[in-house]
Image (tube, grey):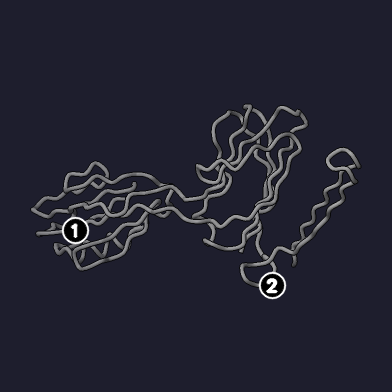
Amino acid sequence: MAISAAITLTSAAGDLTTNALSLSDSTTLTQAASSTALANTSGLARKTTTTTDQYTLFYADDYTADKAHKLYLKNTSTTPAEFFTVHIDDEKLGLMYAGDWALIPWSATDGTKATFTVTLADTWAVSDTIVFDGVTVTSAATSTTAMIDLIVAAKYPNWTVVETSASVATFTAKSSNYLGLIEEGAASDDFVVTTAGDGTGTVARGETAVASANDIKITPGQAANTIEYALFYE
């Protein structure tokens, strides 16, 4: 189903220009480099703020980068002095006062996701454990290969993991906004290895996390206000 957008700008003679101003335009929201209509929406929603802290409405990681997404925003306040500051990541886009609305393009560029590797060595004993991200992996054999297989098979809330080699697993954060920094070395408070024998698990940092490059954020100028928003995306 096609999504149409229209805008009309009017001004009486002498208000803005000598002559009356009447400008109107419309378009169909389409996918990048295509005449195919945008087919997805986040749905129309409202966020009522309770503090003047910054709020994130949309995370870039959740959407395909460099597409023709369109963002709709409206400050629902009727009090002229009440406003929201709109940011794309840390770049200030502008202020939206009472009744202001906007429809803007958004490329959803991702940030950098944290990565690290763990290298297993020496002999593991049955029942040796590795604890990470709230998940405990318990060895059922003595080889590093068998333990790596168990690490890769486990389900972690905030990380994905792949087997790099028979003794190395590589972890990648699911979101660039998960900014936890895993400690380096064998004695990490984040990645805890407990062995009965001489088995080891050494952590080496890879990429350091950087929050999504252009998340959509709003900061209310006053604690209590409501913003209306929707995303139309590929």
Residue at position x 23%, y 51% from top? 130
Q: Quadrant of residue 152?
A: bottom left
Amino acid under disc 1? Thr
Residue in the foreground of this view, choosing between 151 and 46: 46
Percent of width and height locating residue 84? 64, 35
Mark 1 crowd level (few <14, some 14–19, many ≥20, 10 Å Cα) = many
Q: Secondary structure at mark 2?
A: loop
Amino acid under disc 2? Ser
User: Compared with residue 230, is residue 149 higher up or lower down, i.e. above or below?
Assistant: below
Say which quadrant the C terminus sits in.
bottom right
Q: Nearer the viewer, mark 2 or mark 1?
A: 2
Say which quadrant the N terminus sits in.
bottom right
Residue at position x 35%, y 44% from top? 180
Residue 35, label in figure: 2
Name the residue tied to disc 1.
119
Mark 2 crowd level (few <14, some 14–19, many ≥20, 10 Å Cα) = few
Q: For this view, does 208 lie left or right of residue 86?
A: left
